Amino acid sequence: MKTCSKCGAQVADDAVFCTVCGFNFGAAAAGAAQPQGAPQPQPQPQPQYQQAAPAAPSHPMYAPVNPCDKLLGIIAVMGSFIGVILAYFGGDVNGQRSDYLRFYANEGLVMALFSLIGIIPFIGWIWGLFMFVCQIIAIVYACKGETKPVLFFGTIRIIK
């Protein structure tokens, strides 16, 4: 009878595995037979496979945007109603309006309407400063080509 070096159980002399813990006596004997300084076998090189080009993002927030559409999106967010009209009708290609421009035309219109609160003295000035910061954030998103809403302005839908 031999003793398992892992769990200490008594097993038959001809056993390849321990009946208690499953320790492999054959692998332990092969490892003990090799001297410590023996060179280890080199791993075989694996074949290199060509990777396919990454798929286009499925989320519309990161869809590629035409540079002209980016410019119209920036003009729409700058807070003028003329910019909103240009963005809404400027992206018309073969009867299809760009979702990107429709998003920024809507956000520009909502921001322009909320900017009208700025005519109220003192409170309106603070609100005007807040709207200016929101417009800068929206312009940065439009420059990146992302359709991320700025605060609650992107959740209000006037233009569908």
Image (cartoon, rainbow, N blue to C red):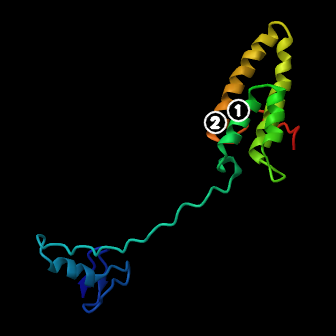
Q: Amino acid at mark 1?
A: Ile
Residue at image mark 1: 74
Rendered location of residue 3, percent (x, y): 25, 81
Q: Is residue 74 visible?
A: yes
Q: Residue at x 69, y 47 (%)?
A: 61
Q: Tell which of 152 and 35 is nearer to you.
A: 152
Q: Quadrant of residue 32?
A: bottom left
Mark 2 burial class by Cα count in 10 Å: few <14, some 14-19, many 20+? some
Q: Is residue 102 above or below residue 63?
A: above
Taking the image as shown, residue 132 lies to the left or right of residue 35, namely right
Q: Amino acid at mark 2?
A: Cys
Q: Quadrant of the C terminus?
A: top right
Q: Secondary structure at mark 1?
A: helix
Residue at image mark 2: 143
Single out the residue that lies furthest toward the bottom: 14
Q: Residue at x 82, y 21 (%)?
A: 115
